[in-house]
Amino acid sequence: MIRVFIADDHSLVRAGFRELLAGTPGMKVVGESADGDDMLAQLMHTTADVLLLDIGMPGPGVLHLLQHLAVDHPRLRVLVVSMYPENQMAVQAIEAGAAGYVTKNQSPGDLVAALRKVFGGGRYVSEPLGERLAAELYARRMGNGRPRLSPREHQILVSLGKGRTLKEIAGVLTVSPKTVSTYRSRILQKLGLRTNADLVRYVIDNSLGP
């Protein structure tokens, strides 16, 4: 029996996942949550095999959550679910420890197949994402990839690219605005940029998100 925990802030989406898994032999929903902090709290006393994790859920960013889960729940397999296509964030999620990445426009059969594959110890990525991962690895080996950002730097870059203020980002990450400002300076230096407008353009040009 595959025990699945659903983490998504949209109640209709959670209901859809519940209905799908209820009708799938060998699968059982053992819990659900609408935000990251509540999810972490519930997982402390809930035994799950696979976590269906929405990439845009409120609370700590998905990369922070993946790092936390890797430490506190190393046996839990995480399947990231997103309404966004396979972009740089998908690559970051896989690198941060996600066992798979599916988009919400894929078929129910794809989702079930992904759950079974990651439960069995494998990784599930679409063909386009697999190609992108291979391209990223090749670029790094050749030394001509984009500057490497840490998961937290990437998260802050995307937030700045969406026009969020230092104070807003600090509130989400539960750090001080000064800490976010330090990250911003580091990001600008790594990317060879100067202003927030440059960051916004960089995020748009490289299809970063969510």
Image: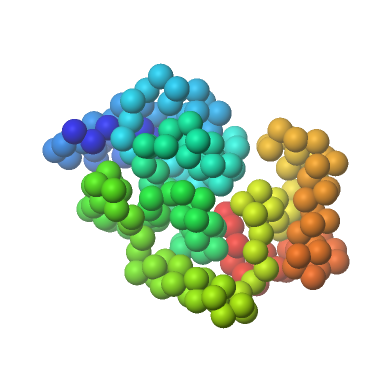
Query: Quick check: 190 left or right of 115?
Result: right
Q: Residue at x 61, y 77 (%)?
A: 143
Image position, residue 115 (x, y; %): 28, 46
Residue lying at the far front in this picture: please name it: 141
Residue 106 to residue 119: above or below: below
The furthest residue to the top: 45
**In screen coordinates, is 59 left or right of 182?**
left
Can you say whether 5 is above or below 153 in the image? above
Residue at 54 percent across and 36 percent down: it is 68
* Residue 147 screen position, x and y as percent: 67, 68
Q: Which quadrant would the C terminus be assigned to in this image? A: bottom right
Q: Is residue 189 above or below residue 74?
A: below
Q: Quadrant of the N terminus?
A: top left
Residue 87 in sight here? yes
Q: Nearer the viewer, residue 15 or 99?
A: 99
Q: Farthest residue to the left: give it.
A: 25
Q: Where does residue 72 sit, x and y in percent of width and height?
A: 48, 31
Using the rendered image of the protein, determine whether residue 14 is visible from the camera's viewpoint.
no
Residue at horizontal 50%, vertical 23%?
Answer: 41
| Color style of the picture | rainbow
Q: How many marks?
A: 0
Closer to the camera in the image, 87 or 136: 136
**Residue depicted at x 68% and y 37%:** 172
Q: Nearer the viewer, residue 199 or 142?
A: 142
Residue 151, position as x, y percentages in the image: 61, 51
**Position of 203 compared to 93: left or right?**
right
